[in-house]
């Protein structure tokens, strides 16, 4: 696991966002993919919730050119985890960076998805934690 990825996961452990239901998460994803912000950045038109996934962490995968799946474990069905995985989808087509899929471009997009889809205050808190722990990101932050 890269150093940057480890730092991100460690920071996320300190957050305790409220869990939701698979149905509510699916409705939220259906809204997210219809926003101008999303349409301007991704060709993915549908994100499918897969829950529960036992024995692994949440993760995003491609399931065709316009479809993605996000697997959620029992303790990760929340909007913060969803924003993390959405940021992966939004950075899939980017050039690889030195930290792989948790590099500065991913982290910048993660902060942006949190700000736009979860809340500006949460994004500021997350950015503050990233700054304190030396997590690198592009985009200038929130």
Image (cartoon, grey):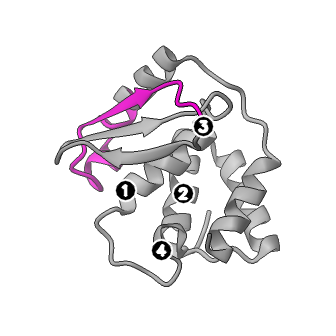
Name the residue at 34% across, 62% down: 92
- Crowd rating for badge 1 (residues with CA inside 10 Å; few <14, some 14–19, many 20+): some
Judging by the rendered image, the residue that carries numbered circle 1 is 90
Q: Quadrant of residue 118?
A: top right
Judging by the rendered image, the residue that carries numbered circle 2 is 110
Spatial CA span between label 3 and label 2? 24 Å
Name the residue at 53% across, 40% down: 82
Verify CB contact (< 8 Å) between mark 3 and mark 2: no
Horizontal and vertical percent position of residue 65? 16, 48
Task: Determine whether the residue tagged by mark 2 lies in a helix, strand or loop.
Answer: helix
Task: Determine whether the residue tagged by mark 4 lies in a helix, strand or loop.
Answer: helix
* Viewer-nearest of discs 1 and 4: 4
Horizontal and vertical percent position of residue 108? 53, 66
- Image quarter where the C terminus lies is bottom right
Spatial CA span between label 1 and label 4? 14 Å
Name the residue at 54% across, 42% down: 58
> In the rendered view, does 65 fall on the left or right side of 120?
left
Name the residue at 23% across, 38% down: 45
- Residue 55's tag is 3
Spatial CA span between label 3 and label 4? 23 Å
- Residue 100's tag is 4
- Residue 101's tag is none
Residue 139 visible in this rendered orientation of the protein: no
Front residue (pair 44, 6): 6
Horizontal and vertical percent position of residue 62? 29, 47
Task: Determine whether the residue tagged by mark 1 lies in a helix, strand or loop.
Answer: helix
**Sequence order check: which comes first, mark 2 or mark 4?**
4
Against 124, residue 24 (above or below) is: above
């Amino acid at each position: 696991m890269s150093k940057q990825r480890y730092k991100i996961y460690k920071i996320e452990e300190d957050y305790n966002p409220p869990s939701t239901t698979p149905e509510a998460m699916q409705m939220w994803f259906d809204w997210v993919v219809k926003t101008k912000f999303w349409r301007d950045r991704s060709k993915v038109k549908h994100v499918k919730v897969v829950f529960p996934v036992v024995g692994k962490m949440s993760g995003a995968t491609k399931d065709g050119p316009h479809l993605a799946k996000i697997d959620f474990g029992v303790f990760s069905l929340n909007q913060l985890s969803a924003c993390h995985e959405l940021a992966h989808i939004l950075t899939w087509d980017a050039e690889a960076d030195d930290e792989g899929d948790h590099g500065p471009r991913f982290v910048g997009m993660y902060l942006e998805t949190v700000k736009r889809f979860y809340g500006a205050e949460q994004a500021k808190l997350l950015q503050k934690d990233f700054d304190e722990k030396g997590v690198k990101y592009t985009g200038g932050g929130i």
